[in-house]
Image (tube, rainbow, N blue to C red):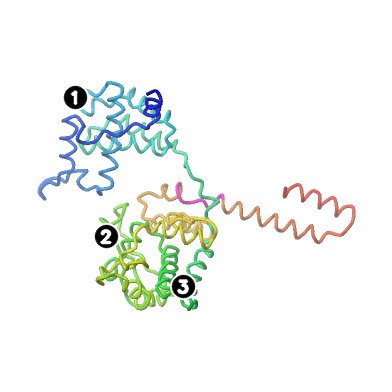
């Protein structure tokens, strides 16, 4: 009995389901999700993507669950009146006591504010916005991707190597060769146009992946992207032959595995059954682990783009914002630009390499031996 109680105490608090919310909260949320007529102003939450609506509702459910545990969830309370500085601070302290990441804590409170704005426009207090900005400023990245980034040449070479292997390795099964070619092209596309993995998986021939002149273009409307900004990116003309060979030769081979064969137009096809390839992020992780010895996930291509641009062409580093579809440049700079650290590391490595060359050429004199000992200390 005691063991069961201890397990319950260690379990993370649940999010109160919408069906268990107080009636006023449910009513306001349902109204916020309702699309009104074209003559009325659109409901705020109605324009959000389903995944955003779900995330806000789940976070708000966590907030309500916190109040319920403290005995502060009155049935007839107005949602905005529950949000006080003391309660929000206590909520943040509770989240921190559960070792949640700073970014998660920021997002939980931000979603409470978004609920208030959606449920009743203008009802979110000014002090809460300031509180959220302070939480955002205190966010510490959980992962340090500096060690994971690789030079762009490594990824481009991997993509081309897979494409070449598929063409040259005749002992490999035909569908396996087709999948290898597909994987290589997928990596090349990400190197050239680092779109989010959701959009990568949604590429469809003639719709979001179209040929114009001698180039292929990636095109998504504002409603099809996370940042609500359209994507209109060309692939370099140099890889047009690779794309076309996949579309005309290898993709039909993969598609033929489907029974009955139906082509929905998706660019990436599964080897096993000819259906659209899902979980592209997992596939990219598998390929890079097998080929590079370490996982280079799909999202790292986005960080790589901003970082390489900052290192190689710092005068145009602002272009990364448009390439990645960010609303504000500070998002690009803060989350993706690891250039300063990486560039500094490369400079140090080059200096150490030069030291090794210099000391190896030193004469076998007392002065030369002294310099070699000093160099060894620097490099140790």
Which residue was labeled with disc 3? 163
Mark 3 lies on a secondary structure that is helix
The answer to which of marks 2 and 1 sits earlier in the sequence is: 1
Query: What's the distance in space between the residues labelled 3 and 2, CA to CA?
Result: 30 Å
The answer to which of marks 3 and 2 sits earlier in the sequence is: 3
x then y, percent, for residue 186: 41, 66
51 displayed left or right of 366: left
Mark 1 lies on a secondary structure that is loop
The answer to which of marks 1 and 3 sits earlier in the sequence is: 1
Which residue was labeled with disc 1? 75
Question: Considering only vertical position in the picture, is 140 above or below 299?
Answer: above
x then y, percent, for residue 268: 35, 66
Question: Considering only vertical position in the picture, is 370 above or below 184?
Answer: above
Q: How many marks?
A: 3
Going 81% across and 61% down the picture, which residue do you hit? 361
Going 37% across and 52% down the picture, which residue do you hit? 326
Which residue was labeled with disc 2? 221
Query: Quick one: label 2, few (<14), some, or many (20+) residues within 10 Å?
Result: few
Query: What's the distance in space between the residues labelled 2 and 1, CA to CA?
Result: 42 Å
**Taking the image as drawn, is residue 268 in sight?**
no
The image quadrant where one finds the N terminus is: top left
- 338 inside magenta stretch: yes
């Amino acid at each position: 009995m005691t063991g069961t109680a201890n397990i319950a105490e260690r379990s993370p608090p649940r999010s109160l389901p919408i069906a268990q919310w107080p009636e006023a909260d449910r009513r306001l949320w349902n109204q916020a999700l309702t699309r009104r007529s074209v003559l009325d102003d659109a409901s705020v939450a109605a324009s959000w993507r389903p995944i955003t609506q779900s995330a806000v509702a789940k976070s708000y459910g966590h907030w309500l669950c916190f109040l319920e545990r403290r005995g502060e969830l009155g049935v007839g309370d107005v949602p905005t009146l529950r949000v006080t500085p003391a309660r929000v601070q206590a909520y943040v302290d509770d989240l921190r006591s559960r070792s949640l990441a700073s970014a998660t804590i920021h997002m939980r409170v931000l979603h409470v504010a978004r609920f208030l704005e959606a449920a009743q426009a203008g009802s979110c207090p000014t002090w809460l916005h300031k509180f959220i900005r302070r939480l955002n400023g205190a966010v510490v990245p959980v992962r340090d991707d500096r060690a994971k980034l690789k030079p762009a040449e490594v990824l481009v070479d991997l993509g081309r190597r897979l494409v070449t292997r598929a063409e040259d390795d005749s002992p490999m099964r035909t569908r396996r060769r087709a999948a290898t070619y597909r994987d290589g092209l997928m990596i090349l596309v990400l190197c050239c146009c680092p779109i989010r993995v959701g959009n990568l998986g949604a590429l469809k021939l003639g719709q979001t992946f179209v040929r114009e002149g001698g180039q292929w273009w990636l095109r998504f409307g504002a409603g099809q992207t996370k940042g609500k900004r359209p994507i209109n990116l060309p692939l370099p003309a140099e890889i047009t032959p690779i794309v076309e060979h996949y579309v005309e030769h290898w993709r039909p081979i993969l598609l033929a595995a489907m029974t009955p064969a139906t082509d929905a137009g998706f660019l990436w096809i599964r080897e096993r059954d000819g259906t659209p390839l899902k979980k592209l992020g997992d596939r990219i992780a598998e390929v890079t682990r097998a080929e590079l010895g370490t996982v280079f996930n799909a999202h790292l291509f986005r960080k790589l783009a901003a970082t390489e641009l900052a290192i190689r062409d710092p005068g145009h580093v602002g272009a990364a914002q448009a390439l990645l579809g960010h609303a504000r440049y500070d998002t690009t700079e803060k989350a993706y630009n690891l250039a300063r650290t990486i560039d500094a590391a490369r400079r140090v490595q080059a200096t150490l390499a030069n030291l090794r060359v210099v000391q190896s050429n030193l004469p076998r004199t007392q002065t030369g031996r002294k310099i070699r000992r000093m160099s060894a200390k620097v490099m140790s």
